[in-house]
């Protein structure tokens, strides 16, 4: 997975309101509404929990260590969703201990391999890659006015693309996928066939997938693989992949029909999953 750089995230806290107004222009929804749409709950079911569930974000020094501003950015996003949240003064085990001592119900932390939100009370864990895939699928669904019956092309069959594929299938879309590592695409197709009895198409090439789809999820860690030739007036792209998979010309041409951010949507879905009614098992999800 791509390790974020300080410059990727340093402007997020100061621009969350501007970011959200752009989200509302593109999807008609706030960040919290998109997260609830991704999780499959009514926003109302969250309101009673916003005042009672406390989050702690714990810095983790293992591996490549702290990314300056990472925990503060996570905290700002969780605060923006409406939860009470703080960053622990200490890192690692001492930080987790502080979280418990301060009665946090959800702990959020990331090392070089995983970024999770763990509800200590229920044991429910929300994983960033899964949450990001679901969040971007929900955002594309809202941008497109519903994906039911539409064809969606997903490039990148890693954990994020995999989660996005399952989410858009659940929303009734027809899915095609591509990955330079052909084995992962075939594995996903096999999983979908066996678990959902659905068939997904494996495209021969990225160009072929792009040329015959208007709804695209770019979930690779490659930069600039989608150029302006792939963009038409009907093209909508949800791009969780870091760095951005569009060339500058494609970015100009797609104008408002693009969702892309380094942390916001994934973190918002994690907060709603781990702090919301689903973590308590007190809510039958709308997708059953
Ligand atoms: O500051 C800290 O606590 C660091 N241990 C955080 C390391 C995060 C590494 N992961 C990433 O940069 C991204 C995450 C958004 C999820 C996947 N990659």
Image: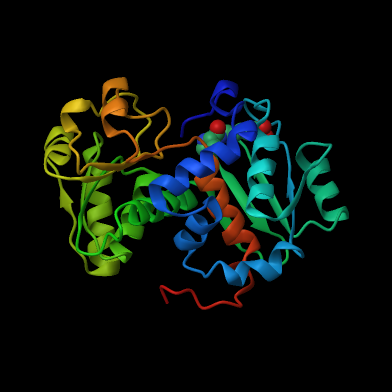
In the image, is 207 to the left or to the right of 220?
Answer: left
In depth, the one of 170 and 84 nearer the eye is: 84
Up the image or down, 118 lies above or below 12; here it is below
Q: Position of residue 74 (x, y in %)?
A: 64, 41
In the image, is 231 to the left or to the right of 38?
Answer: left
Residue for point 19% across, 45% down: 214
> Which of the four quarters of the rendered structure image does ligand 1 lie in?
top right
Residue for point 58% across, 29% down: 9
Way the structure is coloured: rainbow
Residue 63, quarter of picture: top right
Residue for point 62% across, 67% down: 46
Q: Where is residue 231 in the image (x, y as percent from the top left)?
A: 20, 34
In the image, is 42 to the left or to the right of 47?
Answer: left
In depth, the one of 158 and 287 nearer the eye is: 287
Q: Position of residue 210 (x, y in %)?
A: 17, 38
Q: Where is residue 7 in the image (x, y as percent from the top left)?
A: 57, 21
Q: In which quarter of the image is the C terminus?
A: bottom left
Up the image or down, 19 lies above or below 201; here it is above
Residue 180, quarter of picture: top left
Residue 224 seen in this snapshot: yes
Up the image or down, 224 lies above or below 71; here it is above
Residue for point 52% across, 70% down: 42
Residue 112 seen in this snapshot: no
């Amino acid at each position: 997975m791509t390790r974020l750089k300080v410059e990727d995230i340093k402007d997020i806290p100061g621009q969350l309101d501007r970011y959200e107004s752009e989200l509302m222009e593109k999807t008609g929804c706030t960040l919290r509404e998109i997260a609830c749409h991704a999780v499959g709950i009514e926003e109302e079911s969250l309101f009673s929990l916003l005042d009672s569930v406390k989050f702690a974000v714990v810095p983790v020094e293992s591996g490549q260590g702290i990314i300056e501003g990472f925990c503060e950015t996570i905290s700002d996003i969780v605060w923006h969703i409406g939860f009470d949240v703080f960053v622990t003064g200490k890192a690692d085990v001492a930080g987790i201990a502080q979280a418990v001592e301060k009665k946090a119900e959800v702990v959020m932390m990331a090392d070089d391999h995983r970024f999770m939100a763990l509800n200590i009370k229920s044991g429910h864990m929300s994983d960033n890659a899964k949450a990001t895939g679901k969040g971007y699928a929900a955002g594309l669904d809202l941008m497109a006015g519903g994906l039911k019956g539409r064809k969606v092309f997903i490039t990148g069959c890693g954990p994020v693309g995999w989660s996005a594929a399952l989410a858009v299938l659940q929303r009734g879309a027809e899915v095609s996928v591509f990955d330079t590592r052909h084995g992962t695409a075939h594995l996903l197709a096999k999983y979908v066939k066996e678990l959902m009895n659905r068939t997904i198409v494996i495209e021969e090439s990225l160009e072929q997938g792009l040329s015959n789809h208007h709804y695209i999820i770019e979930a690779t860690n490659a930069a600039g693989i989608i150029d302006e030739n792939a963009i038409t007036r009907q093209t909508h792209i949800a791009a969780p992949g870091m760095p951005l998979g569009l060339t500058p010309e494609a970015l100009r041409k797609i104008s408002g029909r693009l969702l892309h951010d380094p942390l916001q949507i994934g973190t918002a879905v994690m907060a709603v999953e781990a702090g919301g009614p689903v973590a308590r098992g007190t809510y039958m999800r709308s997708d059953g």
